Image (tube, rainbow, N blue to C red):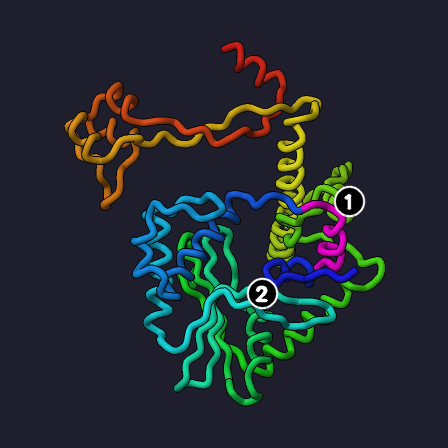
Amino acid sequence: MTFRLPPSSSHRWTNCALAVPASQAYPDEPEGDEAREGTCAAWVAQTVLTGMSVNCAALINYTHENGWLITAEMARDVQEYVDLIHKRGGTTSCEAFVTLSTDPLIAGTTDLTATIASIPTLYVDDLKYGRKIVEVRKNTQLVIYAAAILRKYAPGTFNLVQLGIYQPRAFHRDGTYRKWVVSVADIERMAAEIIEAGRRAYAPNPIGTAGEWCTYCPIATRCEALAQTNYARITVVHSQSHRDMTPLELSRELDFIEEADATLKARKKAVQAEAEQRARSERIPRYGLEMGTGKRRFKATGEVVRMLTGKDPYEKQELCTPAELVRRGASKDVVNALSIVPNTGMKLIKVDENYIAKSFGE
């Protein structure tokens, strides 16, 4: 069977050979909200960088084809990314389909690529709109893009490659824009290692390996390696021995807990998502669905809120929360009439004694 190894999930298939081939047997899961939001943000950047829109603000209140609404916050965040690219100058291309290897097939679409004619450096950047930190060093997705692009140019065209991650909504010690400059030779070396990992995924009877990369894996609920890795880490042992850990033991224990926490969270997220989906048509013992609610927000414009409450609802050029306006002295009844608590869709809940008691007001 021939299947494509996408750069966007290369952090997974370079560590677990089973992930992609095993997922071929199952239908694609619908794109989640986080992925839809990221796709929308990338589209906003692409639209402005290709000259189809004068700036990101012009796209506010437009809806992406996947249904995600472009807000003022997204427009502001993405505009800073666009400004960074414009300031750099050079030749810019967006959303280019590139191929690193045909056997195994490693190919995908870049977010953005910029080359500067006066400096022999290839720039490969990626906009990450989610809040989960993405590191730039040895980022396999960017290495694949860079190596694939280098193959389109004559040897010696570039001396260096700068990989960049722009992540506006997550705190990182290195800031919003993080870069890593490497030689072309290093990019080619890392690309060769990635291609070799791809061959392991193409090999007969690929092996599954659990780790933090299991997060969002399409077969996480079906994977024996992930399940048994977590089971093994929660084996109950009876002992009377105890003592303080040495500093080195403490350091190693922190490393272990971080790794164990990542694999357990990956399994939990996947199992909860499947249970939530199947609970719509099946009975899951001791679990059910209830409508989730978001944070209360205004349904009226700021001008209407100010006129009816007599209070300024703005905070740093954006509407404050209804609760904040009540703290400023606005009538709670009037604020409630001007705001709504949106439904966020059905969510999985555990139907235990505490839930039942709460439902009856006990």
Q: Position of residue 339 (x, y in %)?
A: 31, 27
Q: Residue at the right extreme?
A: 204
Q: Nearer the viewer, residue 154 or 216?
A: 154
In the image, what residue type sits under mark 2? Gln
Q: What residue lies at 65% left-to-right and 78% top-to-bottom?
A: 189
Magenta span dominant secondary structure: loop
Q: Residue at the bottom extreme?
A: 156
Front position among marks 1 and 2: 2
- Residue under circle 1? 228
Q: Which residues are magenta?
A: 15-27
Residue 334 vertical placement versus 205 (above, below): above
Residue 359 vertical placement versus 191 (above, below): above
Residue 329 vertical placement versus 54 (above, below): above
Q: What residue lies at 26% left-to-right and 21% top-to-bottom?
A: 332
Query: Residue 185 sits in which quadrant?
Result: bottom right
Q: Are marks 1 and 2 in contact (CB under 8 Å)?
A: no
Q: Position of residue 340 (x, y in %)?
A: 35, 26
Tell which circle, 1 or 2, labels the residue nearer the N-terminal end: 2
Residue 275 vertical placement versus 29 (above, below): above
Q: What residue lies at 37% left-to-right and 50% top-to-bottom?
A: 74
Binning the other alpha carbons within 10 Å of mark 2 as few (below 14), some (14 to 19) or many (20 upward) gives some
Q: Position of residue 163 (x, y in %)?
A: 50, 71
Binning the other alpha carbons within 10 Å of mark 1 as few (below 14), some (14 to 19) or many (20 upward) gives few
- What is the quadrant of the N terminus in the image? bottom right
What is the spatial separation of the Cα atoms under label 1 and label 2, in whole angstroms? Answer: 29 Å
Q: What residue lies at 56% left-to-right and 70% top-to-bottom?
A: 145
**Residue 25 is covered by the magenta coloring:** yes
- Residue under circle 2? 141
Q: Position of residue 206 (x, y in %)?
A: 80, 58
